[in-house]
Image (cartoon, rainbow, N blue to C red):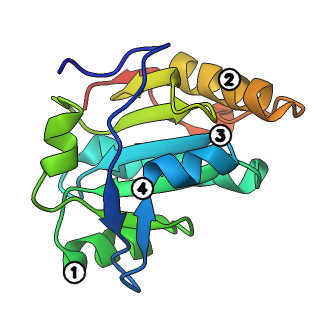
Amino acid sequence: MAIPEVGQSVPDFTLREYQNGNSHRLSEAARNSPTLLAFFKRSCATSRMTLPFVERLHQKYPALQVFGISQDDPADTQAFAEQTGLTFPILLDGDWKVSTEYDLFTVPSVFLLDTEGRVAHVNLGWNREHYDALALAAARLLNAEPVTLVSDADKVPAFRPG
């Protein structure tokens, strides 16, 4: 399968949280609210720069269900979550089975899904304009006021590959 694109359904999966072992099945979660999946790896500098903006989106839109999907082991995942201040559930994909199903070639890879499990927005790597567009797409799905996700005060580059 090629990497999921806007309008396509994504493969379903069940993964466990690194912290408490709770299981999450994507198809069940996505039925309740729009869902954001953020695949990352601790060793990726772009993931370390990007995931705090995913956290910001999580804070600004509480109705958006956010899952981080770590390609690391539990210890590295915990270190990453603590270093970046992530508060949303982080699921383990240390064997890369789900990442392989999504045909990911870069991290971070971020997918915004509607309640039907279809892709509404995709971000690969870091592109400031794409993250602004992600915030707008989330607001539309949630029928909420758009918020500014990235500002000049953040001092982040316009583009950075994953």
Taking the spot 44% from the left edge, 27% from the top edge, the residue there is 157
Q: Quadrant of residue 93?
A: bottom left
Query: Residue 127: x and y, percent?
Result: 44, 22
Mark 2, residues whose alpha carbon is within 10 Å: few (<14), some, or many (≥20)? some
Residue 7 left/right relative to 161: right
Q: CA separation, marks 1 and 2?
A: 33 Å
Q: What amino acid is found at the position of numbered circle 4 in the picture?
A: Gly
Position of 27 relative to 148 (above/below) = below
Q: What amino acid is found at the position of numbered circle 1 in the picture?
A: Ala
Q: What amino acid is found at the position of numbered circle 3 in the picture?
A: Pro
Q: Nearer the N terminus, badge 1 or badge 2? A: 1
Residue 72 left/right relative to 65: left
Name the residue tied to disc 4: 68
Name the residue tied to disc 1: 75
- Tag on residue 34? 3
Q: Nearer the N terminus, badge 2 or badge 3? A: 3
Q: Quadrant of residue 144?
A: top right
Is residue 53 at all visible to an observer of this figure? no
